[in-house]
Image: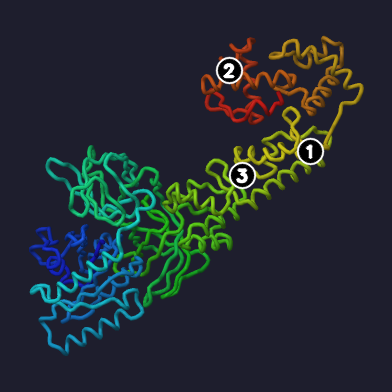
Amino acid sequence: MIIGTAGHIDHGKTTLVKALTGVDCDRLKEEKARGITVDLGYAYTALPGGGSLGFIDVPGHEKLIHNMLAGATGIDFALLVIAADDGPMPQTREHLEIIELLGIRQGAVALTKVDLVGPERLARAATEIADLLAGSALADVPVFPLAASSGLGVAELRRHLEQTAARLGEHQPRGGFRLAIDRVFTLAGIGTVVTGTAFSGTFRLGEQLLLSPPGKALRVRSLRVQEQPAEAGNAGQRIALALSAIEKSEVERGMWVLAPALHAPCRRFDCRIRVLSGHPPLRHWTPVHLHLGAEDVVARVALLGADEILPGSEGWGQITVDREIGVLAGDRFVLRDAAARQTIGGGCVLDIFPPSRKKRSPERLAMLAALADADPARALALAVEQQPAGIDLTAYALNRNLDAVTLSALAAGLKLKLVGTTAFSPLGWRALENRLLAALAGEHQRAPEMPGVEPDRLRRLTLPTLSRPAFDQLLRGPLGDQRIVQTHAWLHLPQHRIQLAGADRGLWQSLQPLLAAEPYNPPRVRDIARATANNEENVRQLLRRVARLGEAYPVAHDHYFTAAAVAELAHRVAGLCGRDGCARAATLRDEIGGGRKVAIQILEFFDRIGYTRRVRDSHVLRGSPEQFGS
């Protein structure tokens, strides 16, 4: 269990930690000289049944709140320290507010310096503490009167801490590993060392880690957990990592050490914000200091769904930061004013991939409400309902740091239709199928003379944002039960048929052998007309009608190939892609003979109809040769 001290300056936080652990957390010369805590201090003490208690001793001075916040994030238990002679002071109140904003619900009050006051003052201090805590997250926590310098009452407090640690047990290391860096230093013979509290997951020596936001790969030489050498570290523990091949100057407090899959630095995120009572309303685009993890960064707050958030109230917001930071849904944060003089509120991160449009729409606000629910199934169910093109499960899992097992269970529980990593609701998938059939029927009505619709055009008519793999999967059902039929490259309803007129059929039968004689470089329209003594425009119009039937393809201007030739070329291109990873004009020319210009025209034709995709000077496969019906 990680315990964080909180309270006003000179109320005895460091002295109390030393009495509980034997460790003096004031490690800096300045702290020793002035007798006050300036930066974070750390101490550990063993538990009777194994394991240890970790203490983070924070500074109490009002000008050092940024250091206090760097240590407070990630603690399990708040130890609010209040001196009996002073009673609650300004920083006591602000630290209590921060504890609440960070979602810390476990705690106790250490009423220190009781040896310096009489019974009457002690009774008044107890009343002041009760008034302070009334209505707060720590309203019902126990109060321990003690004198840390003499040891009076310290044993009772320690016994309570041990019992609480046993009751809470160990953190469940769900999700990928994340550690918020709050200290960086170097040790002779070891190198750069970073310390912090692990927010989630498990790390074992030998596994890959990343420094985020910089994105630098890390190699961990050794680690210590709660000051003890270890082979692995888990969520909820204080961990020190000795890093190889990285300088201290490359690492800063506020950065994260995490599993590479969780590296997603961002500059804006949607959140739920609470404004503290007794502060002015929070208005749109207010400049603030954002404290998240061990980070302190300048930011702006955009309000969603309201012009302001009143004191003591909550609302939706989007926070934009001046530079990239590491953040995931569920992270708690604190907001201080632009001058960093007072805490004004805080909240919880909901979405690190906020939309750029319609961010204040009723649908988006409903999604934020779903994201605020602790059960990830609620937001996922609403997301697949709102997004007909499906939801990227990889991004959804990253946002909430869900592991593969949890994500699979969610998808199975909601009976989602999966196409790769894209998920659709069962109802949404049926709606897409209906849109597909309706789009095809609409095209038949609009252009009855056409034999059908090309696959990529039908995808755009169905839903432009639908991915090609999802469309192919969607098409598979209607093709399988013959609700849609494919003739050559055309998709059509079974009842939709067009035929060539008798005269056109006869002329086509006379021209077809000329195209088939040189299947990969057939004569052009003018050459066919000259060879058969037909009017050039008549030949051109006929070939256009034949192309609509799918018996020929306009590969280039006035250059038609038979359907059989195109099908064979599609197989050859697929073979080149399978062999070389892509097709190029030169390799296709060598494959079919003829000139390079014709090979280029063939590949450009395949790009146009969506069978291939051009990547610089090469062409990679997107479709399947079977789409050409041969």
Q: Are marks 2 and 3 in contact (CB under 8 Å)?
A: no
Specify the quadrant that holds the C terminus: top right
Q: Is residue 206 visible?
A: yes
Q: Please, what secondary structure does the residue beneath circle 3 have?
A: loop
Q: Amino acid at mark 1?
A: Leu
The image quarter containing residue 520 is top right
Question: Which residue is rendered at x = 66% and y = 45% of the image?
Answer: 463
Which residue in the rendered view is the most extreme toward the front?
49
Q: Amino acid at mark 2?
A: Ala
- Mark 2 or 3, nearer chain start: 3
Which residue in the rendered view is the most extreme toward the right?
502
Q: Is residue 62 visible?
A: no
Q: How far apart are the alpha carbons under marks 3 and 1?
A: 23 Å
Q: Position of residue 77 (x, y in %)?
A: 28, 66
Q: Please, what secondary structure does the residue beneath circle 2 have?
A: helix
Badge 2, how many Cα within 10 Å: few under 14, some, many 20+? many
**Total number of numbered discs in the rendering:** 3
Q: Which residue is mark 2?
A: 585
Q: Which residue is mark 1?
A: 493
Q: How far apart are the alpha carbons under marks 1 and 2?
A: 36 Å
- Mark 3 or 1, nearer chain start: 3
Side (left or right) of 482 relative to 579: right
Q: Which residue is mark 3?
A: 465
